Amino acid sequence: MTRLKLFLIFLLQLGVLITPVWAIELVVWKAHDNVPEMILPKLDHESPEQAVRRYLKFLKENPDMIKLMNRDRLKVDALPIQSVKVFDVKSVEKSFDPTFLFIANHFDDLKPNDDRIANFFPVMKKKGVHSFLLPVSADGGLSSHDAQDYRRLVADTFDVLFGMGGDDVHPETYRQRITFAHIQDLNITRDQSEIFLIQEYMERQKGVYYGICRGSQICAVARGEQLVQDLKDEQGVTKPHKSAIHEVDLKKSDDNLIRAFVGDKDQINIQSYHHQAVKPREGMHLDVVASADEGRNFVVEGYQFKNGLGLAFQFHPELLPEDKDNLAIMQGMVDYAAYVKKQKLLNQNCTGLIKGFIKGR
């Protein structure tokens, strides 16, 4: 055992790493053999089984959830309680490997052998990551006070909050009227649930946020940024990128995480699947580190948080697992999360995370 691991164990034994006591607990719910373990909040008076049933009741009664489940052709009865137990929050602290919480935004994500989940979970498991799935609108059925406690507990527990690709974000969340967003995919209940959680996660600054495609867009919205609802080509015609492979430019700087992951390259090939993007502007709260010129548009292809606790991509590195650079990005996300976790354990007020990580590579 390394000296670092012995020192961290010593800190734990001294009680330096203290987990706050919440009125809310988390439970681990398994619905099917071939679905990841899912995380839900549990109230004081509830058993783990009652917590899952409260969530399922919410799905049956909320109009937005009914609409989304009908679109994804999933019925509540198809979500059984195969097993459920209280989640051991302290187990995350005791692990030297990072624990990821992926945010589901489709009910397809809760189905057995889902392709979207298969793109992430097996890869992450190989790299030593403990991965869990957060069901759509997991705070459903909670009071505003309990929902806030739940978000704080999630933010204090998980080393990474991960927003996956998916549907358009409702324009109402970024103060626009609907123009080109796909109306059939919009869901304000789901979007607000994710935005509130991302905002709390960023506010508490305990872990790293990663986002891909929609996960990038909704995080930008949570930061107060705007989205381009529909990308156009030179003739002003909609230009969605459906499984398009193209180059993106990587910003030349000494603190660009993507460049650090792929070996200080100026360009890489990526795969896109989107028709919307983060709207660039002067004075953004985010550092743009990857971009592409597409038709009339300068597209933000990657950004990171100024405090080093977030990185998001418009493109899909998980869809090109055989490509050296995209694989390096997936590995880099794990390595960086592990580095941040170590730094947070050693120094709760650590600064210069990105430069420290790059220097140590």
Image (spheres, grey):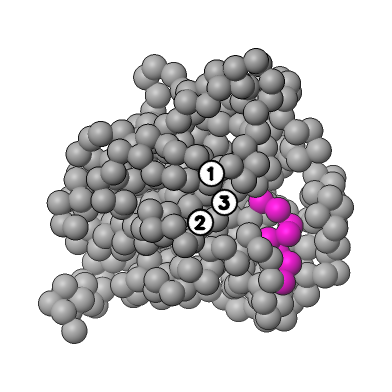
Q: Which residue occupies the extreme bottom position in the image? A: 1
Mark 1 and mark 2 residues within 8 Å of each other at the beta carbon? yes
Q: CA distance from mark 1 to mark 2?
A: 9 Å
With 85 as the anchor, is 304 left or right in this view? left
Residue hosting label 2? 320
Is 70 situated left or right of 264 in this image? right
Q: Residue at x 28, y 43 (%)?
A: 265
User: What residue is pinned by disc 1?
Assistant: 245
Q: Quadrant of the C terminus?
A: bottom left
Amino acid carrying mark 1 in the image: Ile
Q: Residue at x 15, y 51 (%)?
A: 359
> In front: mark 3 or mark 1?
1
Q: Gap in Å between the C-alphas at discs 3 and 2? A: 15 Å
Pointer 2: residues within 10 angstroms few (<14), some, or many (20+)?
some
Q: Is residue 1 above or below residue 246?
A: below
From this view, report whether residue 338 is shown above or below residue 200: below
Report the amino acid beneath label 2: Leu
Tell me the amino acid under the disc marked 3.
Met
List the single residue furthest toward the left: 3
Q: Is residue 108 magenta?
A: yes
- Does the segment drawn in magenta span residue 59? no
Q: Secondary structure at mark 3?
A: loop
Residues shaded magenta: 105-112
The residue lying at 84 percent from left, 47 percent from top is 67
Specify the quadrant that holds the N terminus.
bottom left
Q: Nearer the viewer, residue 11 or 138?
A: 138
